[in-house]
Image (spheres, rainbow, N blue to C red):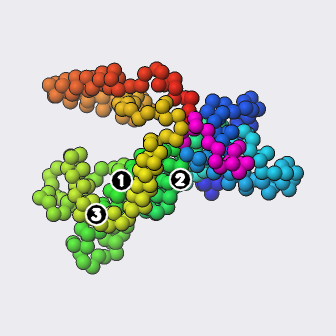
Amino acid sequence: MGRLAVAAAVAAWAIPIAALVDSIVPDPYMDEIFHVPQAQHYCRGDFLTWDPMITTPPGLYYISLAYLASLFPGAWAIKVAEAFDPLCTTALLRSTNVIMAMVCGVLVHDLLLCIKPGIGKTKATAYAILVALYPVHWFFTFLYYTDVASLASVLAMYLSCLKKRFWVSALFGALSILFRQTNVIWMIFFAANGAIAYVQDLSLSDCLSDENSEPTDKSRTEVSDRDSKVSALGLRRRRTNHPIRKRGVVSGSTKSHTSFTEELFDIGFKIWNSKCKVLITFAPFAIVLVAFGAFIIWNGGIVLGAKEAHVVSPHFAQLLYFGLVSATALLPWHFTPGRVSDLFHWCRKNKTFSSLAMLIALGLSFVAVHLFRFLPEHLYCSPLSSG
């Protein structure tokens, strides 16, 4: 019922607004001047013509073809369209993303229930509807861009990975790359997240089997509960007091929290000890990654068209932009009066270290902004190509 409620809620605001947008802006807008004609070529069965200004693969056009093909029998029956080609109007092509927005809402609902099983279906439904109203996502719902369909495939990839359906997750990863090549980064992240959860599960199972070769019903329940938590959270929560095998570190250490370096070393140690199982389990992601690497070599770059406007360059200033936006969004949660007080107290207690760290951070920020950023002409050129 939760999924249906989310889909209905998204449709309730997306369909009327999409109709309003189509009435005000009936012709292709911004990058739609590339996407819409290209999709119409596909509708006519012309799969060889390609606009050299389009940078992304044709995943969106194939999804639109499947969507419009599902509408054609009904359109033909009521004499709206005698052939398939007339269905490929700007308005109907844009409606592809309305459907994808509904899919995104349902996937967010399922992800919330998977990551936080105790949240309840009512809250998950409400949160999913709120996430669907995220401004950037909301804006592209009404245009024929790759953003919404790309997001839907990434969310499906993440959900499948959390449920340990790695082959399905890799297939969604390949699909997401057909929408946007940069989604390969998300695929690598989810695969790494899944690999860490996988080796943690193996470590917990081995530890409990060593402690008791015949586990009781209680221990089985504990393994099941911890397995679901690790699978759902993955990298979201750092583990404390976990057993580290074949190392000189005892699980009953007096430290309540392991350091970040120790945790990284522990994860790497576990992955290395289980490398054969990890390689076999996560081979689907490796296959997609190798295929993507072969594509880059064959294509001579990541983007398909307008390569001169999309040259790969270091853009470290982007990290600063991301940090600023993230800090602003999380300000009410992280910067509580108590935490601010603790921060100032720690800075006064460690004046030398805090002053040095601040100087280094400011220096690196200065270098990033003045040496590793795009010039205005690059920023001007990039919107000319489709993304």
Amino acid type assigned to the residue bearing label 2 in the image: Leu
| In this rendering, position of residue 66 left or right of residue 379 | right
| Residue 215, percent from left and from top | 29, 76
Which of the 4 image quadrants contains residue 372? top left
Pick the residue in front: 314 or 291. Answer: 291
| In this rendering, position of residue 295 left or right of residue 347 | right
Is residue 41 on the magenta stretch? yes
Local crowd size for mark 2, using a 10 Å CA cut-off: few (<14), some (14–19), many (≥20): many
Residue stretch in magenta: 40-56
The Cα atoms of the two marked residues, 1 and 2, are separated by: 19 Å
Amino acid type assigned to the residue bearing label 1 in the image: Ala
- According to the image, label 3 marks what residue? 275
Is residue 318 on the magenta stretch? no
Under tag 1, what secondary structure? helix
For the point 45% across and 48% down, the residue is 298
Image quadrant holding the C terminus, namely top right
Pick the residue in front: 371 or 75. Answer: 371
Q: Please tell me whether the stretch drawn in magenta is mainly helix, strand or loop.
A: loop
- According to the image, label 2 marks what residue? 175
Pick the residue in front: 377 or 151. Answer: 377
For the point 60% across and 54% down, the residue is 2
Which of the 4 image quadrants contains residue 318? top left
Under tag 3, what secondary structure? helix
Pick the residue in front: 198 or 146. Answer: 146
For the point 69% across and 44% down, the residue is 41
View extreme (bottom): residue: 214
Amino acid type assigned to the residue bearing label 3 in the image: Lys
Any part of residue 162 in sight: no
- According to the image, label 1 marks what residue? 192
In the rendered view, would you say 77 is above or below 93?
A: below
| Residue 90, percent from left and from top | 72, 39
Local crowd size for mark 1, using a 10 Å CA cut-off: few (<14), some (14–19), many (≥20): some
